[in-house]
Image (cartoon, rainbow, N blue to C red):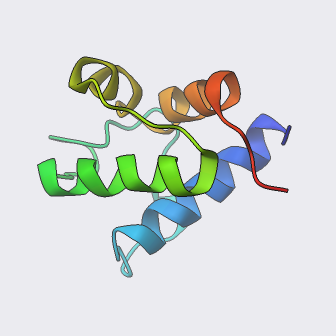
Amino acid sequence: MMETAELKEKLKSQIILFLNLTDLTTADIKDDEPLFGDGLGLDSIDSLELIVLLKREYGIDIKDHKIGRKVLVDVNTMVDYIQEHGKAKA
């Protein structure tokens, strides 16, 4: 499994790519910055994209929106979930 710091960087790059946030760099996204609301300002469409990202890149299938809410809080919570449940691609 990837080192946590490395995984955070990779995930930030994937978030930028998947959500087409071309005006952001990985340095602009703080690990503990909320992804929704006052933080990054993502919306419900973005949350669906993030769920697709987790499925495609890490083999994680989130079907329960309550779990999704807990996982898609910030980069830290996403990385914790990936490390616990993910099947990382080599």
Percent position (x, y) of residue 6? Answer: 78, 49
Figure check: 50 above or below 82: below
Figure check: 66 above or below 74: above
Q: How many marks?
A: 0
Quadrant where the C terminus sits is bottom right
Query: Is residue 58 found left or right of 65 in the rendered image?
Result: right
The residue lying toward the viewer, choosing from 35 and 88, is: 88
Query: Is residue 24 found left or right of 10 in the rendered image?
Result: left
Percent position (x, y) of residue 89? Answer: 76, 54
Q: Going 60% across and 25% down the picture, which residue do you hit?
A: 80
Query: Is residue 43 found left or right of 81 in the rendered image?
Result: left
Percent position (x, y) of residue 39? Answer: 26, 43
Give residue 88's quadrant in the image.
Answer: top right
Query: Is residue 62 found left or right of 10 in the rendered image?
Result: left
* Residue located farthest toward the bottom when viewing the structure as drawn: 22
Q: Going 37% across and 46% down the picture, which residue do you hit?
A: 51
Quadrant where the N terminus sits is top right
Q: Going 21% across and 52% down the picture, which residue do you hit?
A: 42
The residue lying toward the viewer, choosing from 67 and 43, is: 67
Percent position (x, y) of residue 38? Answer: 17, 41
Give residue 83's quadrant in the image.
Answer: top right
Figure check: 68 above or below 8: above
Q: Going 66% across and 54% down the picture, which residue do you hit?
A: 9
